[in-house]
Amino acid sequence: MNPSDDDAPLAALAWALDTGAFTLPAGEVAFFDARLGHGLPRPGWRCVQPLRPAFERLAAHGFDATPEPAAESCAAALVLAPRSREASRARLAQALDALTPGGLIAAVAGNSEGGGTLRDDLAALLGEAQAGSKHRCRIAWARKDPARINAELLAQWRALGEVRHLAQGEFSFWTRPGLFAWDRIDAASALLTEQLPADLSGRAADAGAGWGFLSMALLRRCPGITALDLFEADARALEPARRNLENAAIDISLHWHDVTRGLPGPFDAVVMNPPFHVGRADDPALGRAFIASAAAALAPGGALWLVANRHLPYEAELEARFGTVRRTAEHDGFKVIHAREPRR
């Protein structure tokens, strides 16, 4: 077996389980950031997965999937640790909270993606931890002994996963670690907002909304918008987005939704900064699927406003889906495209 970088942590976790590096205790198992592969998850596990596409794949294969864990209900918690150190520590705190006393926590990450610190983090939190390595990954595990938990550190790490308020210049917003551009205003999205015409009106959609920056900008710039739908695949983004838009004077609807599966239009305008990565590799098919969903959901006179990295090959898809396609700006490696007259 020579697993790719994207599935190496999953393969390493399967190896640890199959070889008895650690033994799962009897009782419920929670699998954090679960995905399919290498014989995992196993039947009966509760799969915690906030990303809608992976959640739907797990559910389609008959697994008990949920975007949020339950507290103190599991005998074991397995974690595919996020790359972000803050997000990883927040996940460890959530996994520990899901365990009953004496329960087992095990986490895995690639050597170049935080794996080297997992054992130290678990030991700091729980007093001690063991570790192993496989497939360019580190696996660390420990038991939950309430008498040895570093309560102050646990509280700090819980807070890392909570919604927080940040300010950048005169702009302030609610956000959460682990989201795309969670601690800053994304430069590409900012470029798009500069190009949005003030006369956009009617019902609008933000496809791949994240914590809601484009939606906030749309409402500030376009007073003719009468209703706004936000579609986001990461369930963790919905609460900060809700807070960022809670004072809007129009109807706001938030949807935990995979945009590649279509949008429930019709809309008069769609804005987007579509994702284009699967793991660390570019996957322009994601952006093309976003464009196809937007075109199908737009009203006949509707318009798409899109920003993307300049090298991404979206033009052919746009020209196939729209009668008029125009690049309105290029800056710092990004391009803004306005498309209208959706084809049916």
Image: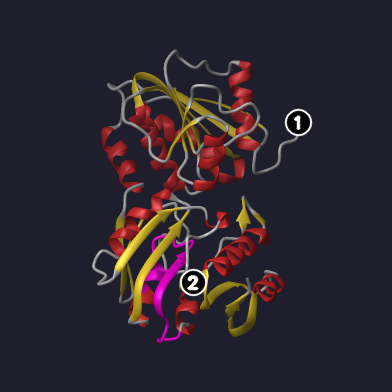
Residue 159 screen position, x and y as percent: 30, 46
Residue 129 screen position, x and y as percent: 45, 25
Position of residue 130 relative to residue 232, above or below, is above
Res 1 label: 1
Q: Is residue 98 magenta?
A: no
Q: Identify the residue shown where x is 38% and y is 75%.
A: 217
The quadrant where residue 72 appears? top left
- Quadrant in which the N terminus is drawn: top right
Front-most of 300 and 276? 300
Res 270 label: 2
Q: Identify the residue shown where x is 45% and y is 51%.
A: 234
Position of residue 119 relative to residue 235, above or below, is above
Residue 164 screen position, x and y as percent: 30, 56
User: How many circles with numbers are drawn on the protein?
Assistant: 2
Dot 2 crowding, Cα within 10 Å, few <14, some 14–19, many 20+? many
Position of residue 339 relative to residue 210, above or below, is below
Q: Is residue 199 magenta?
A: yes
Q: Say what secondary structure mark 1 lies in.
A: loop
The answer to whether one can see residue 336 in this image is: no
The answer to whether one can see residue 157 in this image is: yes
For this orientation, the residue located farthest to the top is: 26
Front-most of 164 and 232? 232
Determine whether, in the image, residue 314 is placed left or right of residue 49: right
Determine whether, in the image, residue 282 is placed left or right of residue 246: right
Dot 1 crowding, Cα within 10 Å, few <14, some 14–19, many 20+? few
Q: Please give the range of residues in magenta.
A: 197-216
Q: Earlier in the sequence, mark 1 or mark 2?
A: 1
Q: CA distance from mark 1 to mark 2?
A: 44 Å
